Image (cartoon, rainbow, N blue to C red):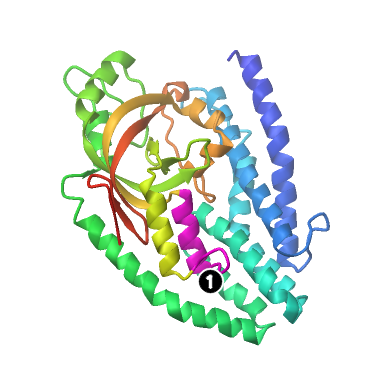
């Protein structure tokens, strides 16, 4: 882009994001004071709209930051970013999401009659499950489970039904988690951690300037330090057909279901969601006593099934089939809503941009999954057998 076009694009994004971030902070802080935004409907539907707006704002903030990188000058010469205030506002916004959600549920519980509890509670499970699977806050589920007790308190009979279901499923989930983890550990021997393999491939070596210095300890930044064909050729030798472990994978809501590892240290991998995963999810549903007439009754079980349905995994053993270097700025300036899950809702990934942000790149891998570890099941794709 020419400089004028960059400025225009950035200003458009800033006008879209900044005022709405300020408004969101005001609404979340009002909630903390017991005042619900008047524009939102009550109950679970209003909370769903509020959380959806938070997700949209994160996406716009990611895009704004990338456009700002495109406007940057060399390190040490660049003035303070005009985007700094937006980034501070996003940092404040994501920190308010948990306490504001808890306060929303508390206030709604006070206005809930006993005959409304079942329907309202079940809808909250759907809304809160989505928040848990999209968030980077690992402990948020415990806080939300406690908050939901306030709604259950309005109907002792239904509360006892939920309590009985929890007693029937909690230990089962703990057992399934341990079993899936043990199976994954038994398969990792020939699969190297992706961060280690990526660092070795990115380092400068004889015949290639690489993307990071020879003695770099991590890929804090990946910069085109020479000819891209030369760099890619050396990296292909190091990476193609390599067996690696990918951590923290999420399903993407694309037309053909995809799975991607969460973006970290300038690398992520993708593959199509295998059909065998559906069998594992269906088996988990049976174990959790769930069918069309009997939905999950706790947030823990709702999240377990939601993550399985989406294609979320703790760990995957994969074989690298293709690789592509993407411009860092382009990846996030043009980040689609369907790919947003590579960055969970929470703090934005920190980046080291070096002297020339426009020369910064990241690595996208196309891989073939050999085995998959969900939190509660394991799928061995090499034997075409679903385990657990």
Which image quarter: residue 123?
bottom right
Q: Residues within 10 Å of mark 1 (few under 14, many from 20)?
A: many
| Residue with the most extreme right position | 38
Quarter of the image that includes the C terminus: bottom left
- The location of residue 316, given as percent across then percent down, is 31, 47
- As drawn, 131 above or below 249: below
* Residue located 56% across and 34% down the image: 336
Q: Is residue 336 left or right of residue 250?
A: right
Q: Is residue 304 magenta?
A: yes
Q: Is residue 45 left or right of residue 164?
A: right
- For label 1, the residue is 298
- The location of residue 34, given as percent across then percent down, is 76, 69
- As drawn, 280 above or below 149: above
Question: Looking at this view, is 104 or 384 the one in front?
Answer: 384
* Residue located 68% across and 38% down the image: 17
Give the residues in magenta: 290-310
């Amino acid at each position: 882009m020419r400089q004028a076009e960059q400025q225009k694009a950035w200003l458009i994004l800033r006008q879209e994001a900044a005022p709405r971030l300020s408004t969101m902070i005001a609404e979340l802080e009002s909630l903390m004071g017991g005042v619900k935004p008047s524009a939102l409907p009550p109950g679970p539907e209003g909370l769903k709209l509020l959380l959806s707006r938070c997700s949209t704002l994160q996406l716009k903030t990611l895009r704004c930051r990338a456009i700002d990188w495109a406007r940057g000058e060399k390190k040490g010469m660049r003035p303070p970013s005009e985007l700094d205030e937006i980034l501070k506002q996003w940092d404040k916004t994501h920190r308010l999401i948990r306490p504001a959600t808890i306060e929303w549920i508390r206030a709604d519980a006070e206005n809930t009659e006993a005959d409304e509890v079942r329907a309202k509670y079940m809808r909250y499970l759907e809304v809160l499950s989505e928040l848990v699977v999209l968030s980077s806050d690992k402990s948020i589920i415990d806080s939300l489970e406690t908050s939901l007790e306030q709604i259950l308190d309005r109907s002792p009979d239904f509360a006892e039904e939920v309590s009985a279901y929890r007693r029937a499923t909690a230990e089962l989930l703990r057992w399934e988690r341990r079993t899936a983890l043990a199976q994954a550990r038994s398969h990792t021997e020939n699969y190297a951690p992706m961060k280690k393999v990526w660092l070795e491939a990115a380092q400068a070596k004889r015949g290639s300037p690489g993307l990071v210095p020879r003695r770099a300890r991590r890929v804090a930044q990946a910069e085109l330090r020479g000819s891209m064909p030369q760099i890619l050729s050396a990296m292909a030798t190091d990476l193609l057909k390599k067996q690696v472990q990918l951590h923290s994978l999420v399903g993407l809501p694309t037309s053909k279901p995809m799975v991607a590892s969460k973006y970290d240290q300038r690398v992520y991998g993708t593959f199509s969601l295998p059909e065998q995963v559906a069998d594992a999810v269906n088996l988990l549903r049976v174990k959790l006593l769930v069918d069309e007439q009997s939905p999950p009754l706790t947030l823990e079980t709702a999240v377990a099934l939601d993550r399985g349905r989406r294609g979320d995994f703790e760990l995957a053993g994969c074989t690298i089939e293709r690789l592509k270097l993407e411009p860092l700025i382009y990846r996030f300036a043009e980040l689609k809503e369907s790919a947003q899950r590579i960055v969970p809702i929470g703090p934005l990934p920190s980046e080291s941009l070096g002297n020339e942000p426009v020369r910064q790149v990241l690595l996208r891998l196309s891989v073939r999954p050999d085995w998959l570890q969900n939190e509660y099941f394991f799928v061995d794709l090499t034997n075409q057998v679903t385990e657990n």
